[in-house]
Structures are given as structure tokens and as C-alpha cells.
Amino acid sequence: MRISSSAERARFVTLHGLLLALALICSYLEAQIPLPIPIPGVKLGVANIVVAFCAYILSLRSALIISLLRVSIVAFLFGSVSSFFFSLCGAMFSFLALALLLLVFPRRVSPIGLSALCAVMHNIGQLTAASILFNTNAVIVYLPHMIAAAAATGTFTGILLCTLLRKFPQNIL
């Protein structure tokens, strides 16, 4: 995207700043209200709605920037080096699935299916991080539970994403 005027630049930066702030607020609130599921690391993934929204409405580049900044800022403010590694691996696996589907099948994948797949990939990324960090493949026993939880939460966040996409014009920049 080429931005020519200072007014367009200001609008671009403002919109991205607002979306990043929204993603940060979602991450913070989500951390304060854990799901009643006895599986470590299972979250609803509301902040990922913002990332997917960016991919649909703005660009994959914007979505990647928002995702990386959110992961970094949340880890810096509320986490640790290990939580950053887990979040980064999950976010990157999820983003790669998002980008691949939107680039290869731009009109054939629904936001609900996309969100569910991205949630599953996020959990696979986190399990990969755990395997690397703890130097064991024993974490694989969590995989079926994590996939089931991700499919459910990803479907829910996909429904929210569909609702959000209907409320906004296709190109708000």
C-alpha cells in the first residue's frame, strides 16, 4: 500500500494504533478471565479477531505488524521470556495459516473456518514451543485436547469476526 499524503499517513498510523490498542486490551482482559477448562494454556483468542480483521480489511502486512507488536508488548508488560516464546510461536503458526489461506483461497474460505484453523495452528505452535523449550516430545499428549479446544474457541471467535466484518466497509483505509 502506497501512502502519498500526510493526511493518509496520519489516518494509517491512527487506525493501526487503535487496532493495536484494541488487541492489547483484548489480550489483557482475556488473561484476567480464564476459561473454565482444565487444560493449561487454553484461551478464547479474542485478540486474534483483531489480527484476522486486519488481514481482511487492511492487509496481511498490517495483520502481521499488529500481531507481532501485540505479542511483544504483552510479553514485555505482563509476561516473561518464555511466555514471549510461546506466544510468538503460536502467533507465527497462526499467521502463516491465515496468510496461506487468504492468498491461496481468498474467496473460498469463511472467516469461521479460517479462525478455527488459525486457533488450531496457534496451539500447535505453542506445543512446538513447549517441545523446544522443555526439550521433550511428551507435550504431544496435549495435542488432541488442544485441537478440540482450539476448534471450539476458534469457531466462536470466527462467528464474532463474521459479525465484525459485516459492520465495517471492506476498505476502511
Image (cartoon, grey):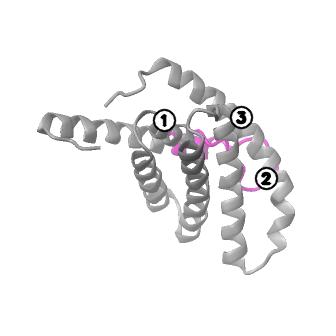
Q: Earlier in the sequence, mark 2 or mark 1?
A: 1
Is 158 rendered above or below residue 35? above
Q: Residues within 10 Å of mark 1 (few under 14, many from 20)?
A: some
| Residue 149 image point, x, y percent | 78, 45
C-alpha gap between disc 2 and disc 1: 26 Å
Q: How far apart are marks 3 and 2 (CA)?
A: 14 Å
Q: Earlier in the sequence, mark 3 or mark 2?
A: 2
Q: Is mark 1 on a helix, strand or loop?
A: helix
Image marks 3 and 2: residues in contact by CB distance under 8 Å: no
Q: Is 59 in front, or is 47?
A: 59
* For residue 12, side relative to residue 63 (left or right): left
Q: Looking at this view, name the residue that lies furthest to the top.
A: 167
The magenta segment is 25-46
Tell me which residue sits at (54%, 49%) in the image.
99
Q: What residue type is labelled 3?
A: Thr
State the SS at label 2. Answer: helix
> Are the residues at dot 2 and dot 1 in contact (C-beta closer than 8 Å)?
no
| Viewport quadrant of the C terminus | top left
Residue behind mark 1: 56
Asked whether 74 or 115 is in front, the reply is 115
Q: Main secondary structure of the magenta part?
A: loop
Is 32 magenta? The answer is yes
- The residue located at (64%, 31%) in the rendering is 110
Query: Marks 1 and 3: CB-CB under 8 Å?
Result: no
| Rendered residue at 40%/43% (across/down) | 20
Q: Would you name the residue on which mark 2 appears?
A: 146
Q: Residue at x 45, y 59 (%)?
A: 72
Q: Which amino acid does label 2 sit on?
A: Met
